Amino acid sequence: MTDEQFPDPAVQVSAAQEIAPDLLVIPNQRVQLVPSIGIIGGTRSVLVVETGIGTANAEQVLALASEVARGRRLYLTTTHFHPEHAFGAHVFADRATYLVNRAQADDLKTKGPGYLKMFRDFGGQIAQRLDGVRVPTPDVVYDDAYDLDLGGRTVRLRPTGRGHTKGDQVVEVPDAGVLFTGDLAETGQFAIFPWFPPYDTDVSGVRWLTVMDRLADGGPRIVVPGHGDLGGPEVLGNVRDYLRELRDETWRRRDSAMGEEEIVAEVRAVLVERHPEWAGREWIERGVGCFCAEHGGRPFRQ
């Protein structure tokens, strides 16, 4: 990938919308490398979900959150360690308490520097936005779950286990029926599979499917995906159905001992025909590679 593939990943805080009382979402407006960002308020504290990529984006998010908070204490969390979600957290140092699950903290420490270099190597506007950025260190790391009392509103931080990454975390706002999924769910695009062997193979299509089944059973009223438009519980069902399609189409061909290149070509053609309006077709190949690796059958035909 090169910078030419991406528009400037600028967070547009002016697009913030209130989806429930004292709960704002800054939509990504379908701009690549811009996440959906949340600002969730209680009587005593305000929680920010995601930072955007780089210092300037995070400064805008922090400014809006501070305006909303009006003196209330600030917290920050991120759904996983990828740069557009977490690599602005340094801006919140000394202004907010940054808390994440342990697996995500491990990802930040062990994989963060490599991802920072990779994204800087895209060059252009992405490199500029990452100028001077350092990999963040959380203030609070939890293990099994964390219930954050904001005052009259409790937000549930829940690690999901391996899916899109090893350290995925969802953020639930039960009183509003809102679920922030991070990149476990997207709308309007093929699921993002960061399958980059031998450097990063933590994504698991099989476990991701299990996670989506569990999230769908929770029945949220509003789903805030990592990228794309907000929706209802159908967002979770649609992602789950796509992952099943990808798995089944891949494994059906894998069972016949086709080579991986043949599998990629055929599966890509099938899925693009079924979802011609979706963006991110480059992730189909990564997803096929992941599901091939998770298949328990015979070796590839040479």
Image (cartoon, rainbow, N blue to C red):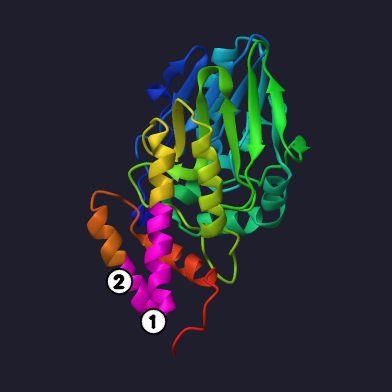
Residue identified by numbered label 2: 266
Amino acid under disc 2 = Glu
Res. 247 in view: yes
2 in relation to 67, above or below: below
Lower position in the chain sequence, tag 1 or tag 2: 1
Looking at the magenta stretch, what is its main secondary structure? helix
264 falls in the magenta region = yes
- Residue 135 image label: none
- Image x and y of residue 141, in percent: 76, 38
Amino acid found under the numbered disc labelled 1:
Met
Quadrant of the rendered image containing residue 32: top left
Task: Estimate the x, y position of residue 127 in percent, counting from the top left.
Answer: 49, 51
CB contact under 8 Å: marks 1 and 2: yes
Element on which disc 1 rests: loop
Residue placed at 37% from the left, 66% from the top? 249
- Name the residue rendered at 51%, 44% in the picture: 213
Magenta span: 242-267
Q: Nearer the viewer, residue 108 or 289?
A: 289
In percent of width and height, residue 238 lies at 38, 44
Q: Quadrant of the C terminus?
A: bottom left
